[in-house]
Amino acid sequence: MGERLLEVKDLSTHFFTHVGVVKAVNGVSFTLDREETIGIVGESGSGKTVAALSVMRLVPDPPGKIVAGDVRLAGRDLLALTEDEMRAVRGNDIAMIFQDPMTSLNPVFKVGDQIAEAIMLHQDKKKDEAWEMAAALLERVGIPDAKKRVNQYPFEFSGGMRQRAMIAMAISCNPDILIADEPTTALDVTIQAQIMDVIREMQTQFRSGVIMITHDLGVVAEIADKVMVMYGGRTVEYGPVDAIYYDPHHPYTWGLLGSLPRLDLAEKHRLQPIKGQPPDLLLLPPGCPFVGRCAYEVPRCRGEWPPLELVGPDHGVHCWIPVERRLEMRAGLPRFKEWVA
Amino acid sequence: MSLLEVKNLKKYFPIKTGVLKRTTGQVYAVDDVSFSVDKGETLGLVGESGCGKSTTGRTVLRLIEATGGSVTFDGVDVMAASRAEVQKLRRDMQIIFQDPYASLNPRKRVKHIIGEPLDIHGIGTEQERRRRVFELMETVGLSAEHAERYPHEFSGGQRQRIGVARALALRPRLIICDEPVSALDVSIRAQIINLLEDLQDELGLTYVFIAHDLSVVKHLSDRVAVMYLGKIVEISDSDLLYDHPQHPYTEALLSAVPIPDPATERARRRIILEGDVPSPANPPKGCVFHPRCPRAQEVCTSAMPALAVTGEAGERHQVACYFPTRYEGGRRSVSESSFAGAQPGAAGPAGAADA
């Protein structure tokens, strides 16, 4: 792999609310190289968005606070930067696209204004130059009639076009890292395919690293080189994309894979859901957040968070169940054979 | 015999503008849709936002009044039914909504939400109703102890269970499931899907399952209808549709769904459609799909083709296309010349508007 862009180590972000402390992100570590894509997967409340916002230092404070950890962008300690220095990093080095393109664009400004603003903020360009660049960028992300479209307002754009405009804005300063937070969740599937295509194209062109945050394991399989599975603010498992799908070690990863209806399998299968409800983030146990829903719990799980265990090259898992036992249990899962087939 | 028979169903919403609220146009939300559902079967209605799948479901129940067409439920003409008759029909036909947050009244206790249909229809004594509510909660996997709670005390998946219990209260025969799992997380979604399957087996229910997620629809449905811009473009047995899609839109839709298997994903060729879905207020002339269709020829701009039988599957697989994909001896092909069986459908709204 290429040059290391980002290194996140033991990141913890907590929210101090009037009802208690929400440990949204709890000791999360990952790295990202040039031209690499990491998929951060998890359900609502798993901390995947907060982890990304922490890297950007965009967590609202108060109530949020990065309480521990280390975030290094090409060796630079981002958590030690002043707010002004950080502002220069955002957009320039790291850019983010959000889930809902309707609320992340300002409805009262023309699309061109909003892209040009980002350009003028980070580059020494005059207004008309920036506008021209905005039109060129829109064209690059596949918006037809871009010269006319820059003069339009967000409401005149469809959902897919708004997301393209967001991507245009994000790539306007050739960022090294693109964080995409559920960029296609609000879009229809044929439009999702278009947007994924644009993201991939931009990644190749700018040789960026991409952090793809999603709950959709299909999207991850499509785009990611490596995957981090989050649950209750913790990384329960991470590894190369093939390892996560074909050699998953954490019971939660099994649960996720077993819960999915598959379009490509001929026979009908009974889904294997995870029992119970997602945890209350205010009342997380000191140990593994998956206790209570895990079918294989051992007494130790409640009291202590398991250390990282390497089970393959660059493939780690946090789980107290001994590895031989784990593999035995996995082999007994009704649907596991189909996944690896 | 079919339990539900929908013929040429139309729903046009007027567009009103100006101070006088004059009608200046129509949104052709559902336009000439026909299908039937057998007892105990699940028909999936799939399509992207704005294709009219939810409007179809609601029009069938007369939650909104149709512009035209007929709906027959177990031999009874739903469209001609009086208010009292419709209320009676609703015992047999129920609906589960998408958003478990918006579809439950936050000021009511769960026992009242689930029991309300029983109250409205005056079924049983108070004691019997209470027992029925507990029984329903048990059926959908909720603890009867929670009957006194309010909706906000439940998680998304549990709320959707409340919605299911409410729909079951009157012992309906048909349930329209309008995106019942779309708002739920993966692990919870699987719980609700399994619940719906179990209930169908136990109670012999018939479902119309409306969703945009093709994997979920495939998993649950016996037959699937694919909608685009107010029309059904292809309808078929579920397996046939997924293995041998004939309409170019169905093919594109299927190919666009990411599959949770990295090796499969790397090997896949994706058909990427250009552009966006046109506005249903101003649908294209001819086949509604032709502006985005890679196969479109001149004939496609003349009139919307009617659903027709094209292959060996006979009546079970119908497609509305002049150039459907053929599968012969395991080989996939698309003919250069237009398919003889494809006939222009009844004059669509675009034609009518010209007149």
Image (cartoon, helix red, strand yellow):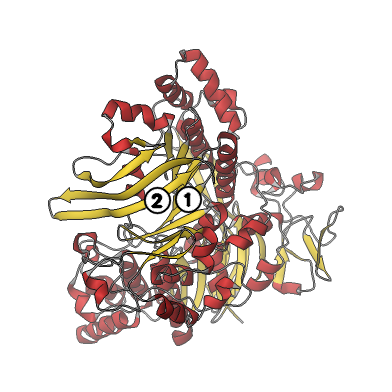
Residue closer to the observer: B75 or A186: A186
Return the residue at label 1. Answer: A38
Q: How many marks?
A: 2
**Residue B84 in view here:** no
- Which is more foreground, mark 1 or mark 2? 2
The chain to which mark 1 is attached is A
Image quarter where the N terminus of chain B lies is: bottom right
Residue closer to the observer: A73 or B118: A73
The chain to which mark 2 is attached is A
Q: Amino acid at mark 1?
A: Ile
From the viewer's perspective, tell me whether residue A277 is left or right of residue B73: left
- Numbered disc 1: secondary structure: strand
Return the residue at label 2. Answer: A30
Residue closer to the observer: B202 or A97: A97
- Sequence-wise, which precedes: disc 1 or disc 2? 2
Q: Residue at x 37, y 77 (%)?
A: B168
**Residue B252, image x and y in percent?**
66, 54
**Residue B256, image x and y in percent?**
61, 54
> Which disc number belongs to residue B129?
none
Q: Amino acid at mark 2?
A: Phe
What whole-number distance in Å separates the C-alpha atoms at marks 1 and 2? Answer: 9 Å
**Residue A103, image x and y in percent?**
38, 39
**Residue A293 in view here:** yes
Q: Residue furthest left?
A: A18
From the viewer's perspective, tell me whether residue B120 is left or right of residue A75: left
